[in-house]
Amino acid sequence: MTGTPREDLARFLRDDLQQAADGREDVAYEQVEAYVDGMLDDVDREIFETRLADDPGLRAMVDDLRALRTALPAAAAAHAPVVAFEPRAAVAPGKAADRSTSSRRWLLPAGLAAAAAVALLLWRPWTPAPAPPSQAHDQPRPSTPPASATPAAPASPALALALRDRGRTVGLTSDGTLAGFDGFGSALQARLTETLRQGRLPASPRAAEAVARAGELMSGQQLASESGASFAPVSPMATAVSSATPAFQWTALRGATAYRVRVVDDRLVTVAVSDPVTTLTWRPAAPLPTRRVLSWQVEATTPDGARTTPAPPLPEARFTVLTPSERATVSEALTTAGGSDLASAVVYAEAGLYDDANRALSRVMDANPASAVPGALKADLLRRRFGRADGR
Amino acid sequence: MDSREDTRTLDPLLVPFVSAASDDDARSLLSDVMSRDLVPIVRQVVRGHAATRDVDGAADGEDVEHSVLLRLTHQLWRQRGDDEPIANVAAYVARTASNACYEQLRERRPQRARLHARLRYVFRHHATLALWERKDGGWACGDRGWRDRETVLGWPAVAEWRGRIAVPDAVESGSEAGRLVRLTEAIVRALGAPARLEDVVTLAADALGVADGPIAPELTASGELVTPFAPDGLRAPGPLADELFDQQRFLARVWSEIGGLPVRQRVALLLNLAGPSSQDMLSLMPATGIASWAQIAAALEMDADRLQALVPGLPHDDHTIAGLLQVTRRQVINLRKCARERLARRLGFERGARPGGGR
């Protein structure tokens, strides 16, 4: 600063604004989508709208996506799935064999993965019986679950699909009507019907980014074992969490003397970092931000140096934290679920609380050991989160 | 420039550069990191992105690479200043490169970029369709049930459907958006297997007759031929030549544009207006007659007494401003960054232009 105040100020502002122009970050598609889907907090929304005001092209894109957002639910409701479900046995064995040779083992226990894979082989989504009543008792219904799907369910001739759920028998009748959930809200009943018909829990827009963007920047399909993946994150991953101070868990690395966890937001800014710990779990002292896709890594200190997981080319361990109002909504919905594990799984999945949904499904599985249905639901959930039905 | 004292959350790759005692050492270290570790990442992302490929599939990404590397140099250099530490520089670089490619697509082929975004949204939100990442970093799309499949159709197999997929009627589909959804479903149904998103975009563009016309160079007032890659509106009217030399008018225009910012951005910007040696620059505004303290208080939407209490501490750090705005420190940084970028746009500053906003 060597000139007059006016010269100094003008020079400073010109330099500063040129730097701002040089360092301007481009608008990512994900930002546009998050804006359209209402996933930005008020500050990010303000920032996006500031850019929007100067960019007609961006405004056109936002308008496009908003129109699609309006059109899509109608499209989904009005149209059958684009591709009919194939008989699982026709496609799954090869896949199962491929997976059995895979050495990536850090996402899920192998036993659970195997159960889920077997379930996929056995169960197909329910579809209404197509035959007229006069033929219905004489002809097989290829699209209904095979008999092996529900052999252990209590005798219930009216139910084409039956499950034990906290002492009750629930399921679908032969015409696709939900049974055993009397007194539940109509919205929850509709989602339960859809879940049992499709063999798929509701998707959660809330956790979509934590799941869909996992590995976006890295080669997420690479196997953890390629880099010696005994040391790996366990949870949270590809899910929403209800606690703003969730417990982070990871597996041990032989020889490690301490671990340090770092949580970053979607701009790679550190939002929490632990002191060195000697346990395999850590919980942040301060609440983590909500409405953001967060990711985390754990760094192990060893005599040979530091080692971090997950690291490229593995996918990032992403998650998102529910807001207090979202948590309240979940609590309220669980009240209407009346203690049903299946209904709870639906509520959790809808909120993106996939770990909780998975645990609820495990309870359904325990209550129905011979049924393929809960296993298939778990397999679909795993595939949705990690891209593979066995979680590997 | 002072080196950063606390590099605990910084990516280890950047620590030597950020901690370098002199700027000369830092430049050398940054150059090493860029060429050894970061250029390959940029190259991989850029060369795999559709934005840098022409219709025939030939790579044409050198200018994008160059642009990304230039921008990264600026961004990483700020790590020696107050910018939030980058914890994972590889991911940061990949994201920057990917965003730049997408921006390039928007600029060079806006119609295709628009269709690309719309199809991506359909695949990500449709009840039975899906979009997933492939091993090579590209995107595959199709029915949700296909997500386990590791192979995708090659372009020849997709191209066989060119001209053979009927475009649904817009009226029957309920809207243009509905028509695109129907068309996407029809394409997936026809293909019967996963395909690259880019190939599906090409097929859809073909069916809908979407094409970007050649971009004609424009002759500027100064007789320079300029290819207008930027979308309409991004290039705001720049300062007139005489304004560049008229500090008073330039400063008045800056102040006028500051008044057009949302109030949180005004606060984040003005209360942290710090010169190269962290000196207070806001106080120069009343001193030069650009804006009085009363006008500044009005811009900050606070009374004069409150502003006067803040003046001795100028420029204020982000924690203090975060407290005033009831937002996080990171949000303060983002608000200020957004404000500076908007001012730069509105005042005609462009990437890579010579200092002063000239073009």
Image (spheres, coloured by chain):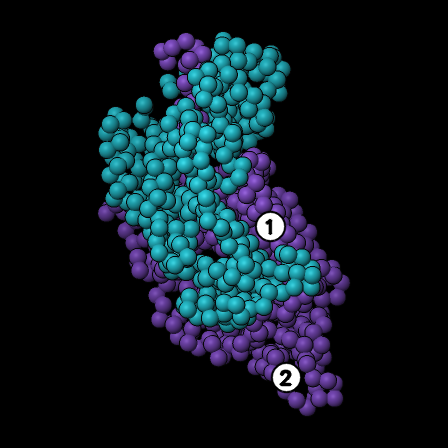
Chain colours: A purple, B cyan
Q: Which residue is mark 2?
A: A141
Query: Residue B265 falls in which quadrant of the image?
Result: top right
Q: Can residue A249 be seen here?
A: no
Mark 2 residue type? Arg
- Residue drawn at the location 29% of the way across and 48% of the way down: B40
Task: Say the numbered circle drawn on residue B181.
Answer: none
Mark 1 residue type? Asp
The 10 Å Cα crowd at callout 1, few under 14, some 14 to 19, many 20 or more, is some
In the picture, measured across the screen, residue B237 lies left or right of residue A166, that is: left
Report the front residue among A305 and A41. A41
Q: Which residue is mark 1?
A: A64
- Could you tell me which quadrant the C terminus of chain A lies in? bottom left
- Residue drawn at the location 32% of the way across and 23% of the way down: B1
x, y (%) of residue B296? 57, 16
Q: Can residue A126 be seen here?
A: yes
- Residue drawn at the location 37% of the way across and 18% of the way down: B277
Instruction: Describe the element under mark 1 as helix, strand or loop.
Output: helix
x, y (%) of residue A1? 37, 13
- Residue drawn at the location 68% of the way across and 51% of the way down: A332
Report the front residue among B185 and B16. B185
Q: Is residue A390 above or below residue A218?
A: below
In the picture, measured across the screen, residue A8 lies left or right of residue B129, that is: left
Query: Residue B83 falls in which quadrant of the image?
Result: top left
Task: Name the chain under label 2.
Answer: A
Report the front residue among A6 and A233. A6
